[in-house]
Image (tube, rainbow, N blue to C red):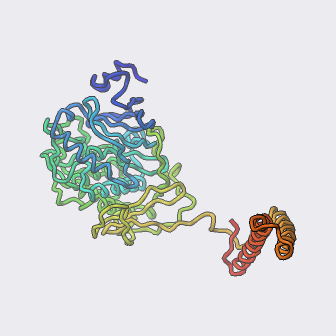
Amino acid sequence: MLSTPQWHRNLGGQVPGEGRLGHYRLLELLGRGGMGQVWLAEDTHLEREVALKLLPLELAADEDYRRRFEREARLAARLRGPHVVPIHAFGELDGRLYIDMELVEGSDLGKTLRDRGALPLEQAVDLVTQIAEALDIAHRAGLVHRDVKPSNVLTLPNGFAYLIDFGIARGVGQSTITGTGVAVGTWAYMAPERYSGTEDLRSDVYSLACLLFETLTGVKPFAHLDPVQQMAAHLTTEPPRASAQNPRIPAAMDAVIIRGMAKDPGGRFPSAGALAAAARSAAQSAVPNPSPTRRAAPTAKWDAAAPFPTHGTAYTPPPTRTPQPPRTSSPYNPIPTALTPPPGAMQPQNAMQYRTPPNAGTPQPVMPAAPYAYRQPNIAYPAFTGKPLEQPRIKGWQPVWWTILALLTLLFGILSIATIAITCTEGFGGWGTTIVAWFMFVGPFAMFVWFGVREVRKFRSDRRRWRAGDFRIT
């Protein structure tokens, strides 16, 4: 743990005590940026580790921003989707606005790009597709993320991705500038209209196009160090071509990025999903089968320890995945399907089907054709595939059980006959004694007869199923 002076330097001297903020014990600084810091923290009330985001001090001093923060964070906490990290709590503690998020074990995409450079075309498009899904869920709820960038994307070793930091999202049409003059977001990825204080969901589409450019090239679209130059480039400079940085990028992908980064919001894709669909189509024009496979989305400690997989190594399809045919027309992996909205969600005409994160061994979710609908893919269950039909066998313990059952049935059958005979002749001396005798001898006999009939019926049923060709040994 850091010493007290180090805690105060990291947090502007605003954290009282030995690395504590309210009921949170701060354990490790996971990352920092223009919109605050993210700490690995322990919630001492619930005794669990969380990712605790602390917003800048000047935002807590802005009364108008604080009210909007609470309202929008409450909406963000309701978001549910496979690529959205849940928000546990939010509010103000010791003069700092905070967001309590679930910990996710994953790698910071920004760090991965700095260390490894550009991603292969198929992986970059697949990753953008996943982030677009998270954005579409937020946009349907009326939220603009406002800070889509590589450092807000966590990737798991199997290629599954999360978009984080929904806690600073803003309602569509609201100002993007705080009362203290702070622009919320990261300048290297901000849409031109953001600098004038306006935004809508197409502002996130612009940022997503910037992210797509960076994943394909390893550099930002406008790699100026001076924020003023970055702002001027976003406002006036034509979008760069990824193929100029990476000759393996097809011209069709340049066209996707240029449209996504159009200065006029009306010239951009109408949704994040539409941009992802165009990127996938462009990738298919250069690669025969650009469908990398994502697997499970475990939830654990977020320590940025696992690197993003490289093409041809850790990025391999799961054995139980059924092959997916090439798709060309939808925002993600497009096949028109019936809509299945999330529990408790509204069901507009163009709603997208909600998906839960895949469990281990299940195939990746796929995205639908417009109007957006998520599809549950066919699953090949390993326990019932590729096994021959076999005649049911008698297991080793069954003869022993059947012998014991037969002896017990015989024994209590004799006792039951004797009980009935005594009842009909001499009697047991009273109704109470008679009931006890029947319960002790006739009752077990009936139970063992029932067990025997059940075993016979089960064995015959298995044999009938085998003859009908519907019996498999698992």
- Quarter of the image with the N terminus is top left
Residue 58 higher or lower than 129, as above or below: above
- Image quadrant where residue 257 sits: bottom left
The residue at the far front in this view is 429
- Residue 413 visible somewhere in the drawing: no
Quadrant location of residue 282? bottom left
Q: Is residue 361 left or right of residue 92?
A: right
Whether residue 407 is visible, yes or no, is: yes
Residue pictured at 40% horizontal, 65% vertical = 333
Q: Is residue 332 left or right of residue 395?
A: left
The quarter in which the C terminus is drawn is bottom right
Residue 469: image location, x then y, percent: 68, 79
Percent of width and height locating residue 185: 23, 42
- Along the line of sight, the residue nearer the viewer: 122 or 379: 379
Quadrant for residue 431, please give it.
bottom right
Number of numbered markers = 0
Whole-percent x, y for residue 44 in the image = 42, 33
Q: Nearer the viewer, residue 82 or 33?
A: 82
Q: Residue at x 38, y 63 (%)?
A: 367
- Relative to 184, is 37 on the left or the right? right
What residue sits 57% from the left and 59% below the top?
319
Residue 415 image position (x, y, % from top left): 85, 68
